[in-house]
Image (cartoon, rainbow, N blue to C red):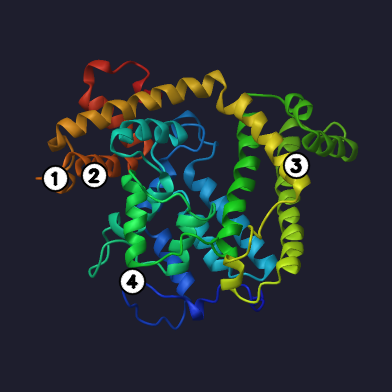
Amino acid sequence: MAIRLPLAPYASDPGQSRGRIYPASFSPTRSAFQRDRDRIIHSTAFRRLAHKTQVFVPLDGDHFRTRLTHTIEVGQIARALARALGLDEDLAEAVALAHDLGHTPFGHAGEEALEICMRPYGGFDHNAQALRIVTKLERRYADYDGLDLTWETLEGIVKHNGPLLNGAAGNPLANFIAEFNQEFDLELHTFASLEAQSAALADDIAYIGHDIDDGLRADLFSLTDLANATTFISQILGDIDKHYPGLERQRIIHELVRRVITLFVENVITTTRSNLTRFNPKSSHEARHAKEVIVAFSDEMNIAQKSIKNFLFKHMYRHEKVIGVWERARDAISKLFPKFMAEPHLMPPDWESLVKNSTEEARAIVVADYIAGMTDRYALGEVMRLYPMDANPASDRLF
């Protein structure tokens, strides 16, 4: 039976949560942050992540990561970091599970396309969209819209990548954050909790590990290519070869990925403990007001992770196979947005009703909400329904 260690003084204490917008009844079996985690897991937006792209469109193979499998991996790493640092594991996991809820279909390609479509109206941002989902767009509870998450989880969703210092001028989604902040002050000028900071680095660690895995399994690059590009990977592969000469490629890949993740996790723990000694925060409030982020990689590991990201950007995200899919994904979003803007009756009735007698900007936000919530499969189906003349033999697979 696992033993839960007492929280450190700088951890977020669920018993001292700043609460929710709507009063919630006391639960004798779950903490406030456990309830947040459970509400996120049972949300419609969370289920949709199973059919949203991470890098590869899910239709392209059964063994590549989706947004859902990525999110689960991030949650596991976030909990591991929180446990080692004396933080609240449930809050770290809740922020991790919610961090990608605002992503569009087709991953970053879809987000780029929707951002371009929304540019005349201020743009699109997936973190702001995640806040809209958990405070407005999830319509499940009898008493209110959204999931009514605690202040700490909402703060983590909005600020896990750092303080928001640039205001919200001209951006309707950022304006949404600013307007929400007037109602429920998330202290946008400070860092988020250490639990949210842990979730942010867990995201980096997870996608570095699984993109190496997926890229190798898709033959976008070789182990030799990867070793030649970064000393960090070369040393790991050399150690694997030393201890397991002649090991089959599939096992080498798994051994590489697990070692990469382990080394990054251990480095974060070591570096963060040093930072905690240096800053000596006596409370979660003091941790938020530190002069810099506390949960961090060492300088040496920052160099390693940047070299891996640079390699993946060139050899994976810009690989002709991936670019070809992304271009078709962008084309799909670029077709859907103007169609729904011009003919909102083509959306389901409950969505169409939201744009009646609205301004053009308000209609654009509703259309963006509708498209951003689509799964890859549903978006493809909508393109085929609205543009049947564009259908081709490959449409059932990937357009």
Where the N terminus falls, by quadrant?
Answer: bottom right
Q: Is residue 75 left or right of residue 123?
A: right
Q: Is there a contact, CB below 8 Å, between mark 3 and mark 1?
A: no
Between the residue at mark 2 and the residue at mark 1, the CA separation in whole angstroms equals 10 Å
Q: Earlier in the sequence, mark 1 or mark 4?
A: 4
Which numbered dot is residue 255? 3
Under mark 2, the amino acid is: Val
Q: Quadrant of residue 212?
A: top right
Which numbered dot is residue 21? 4
Between the residue at mark 4 and the residue at mark 2, the CA separation in whole angstroms equals 23 Å
The image position of residue 343, as x and y in percent, is 14, 32
Circle 2 residue: 366
Q: Sort mark 2 into few (<14), some (14-19) or many (20+) by Cα contacts within 10 Å.
A: many
Q: Is there a contact, CB below 8 Å, between mark 3 and mark 4?
A: no
Which numbered dot is residue 358? 1
> Looking at the picture, does residue 51 appear above or below residue 151?
above
The answer to which of 352 and 172 lies nearer the viewer is 172
Q: Is there a contact, CB below 8 Å, between mark 2 and mark 1?
A: yes
Q: Which residue is drawn at 41% across and 51% down?
A: 167
Under mark 4, the amino acid is: Ile
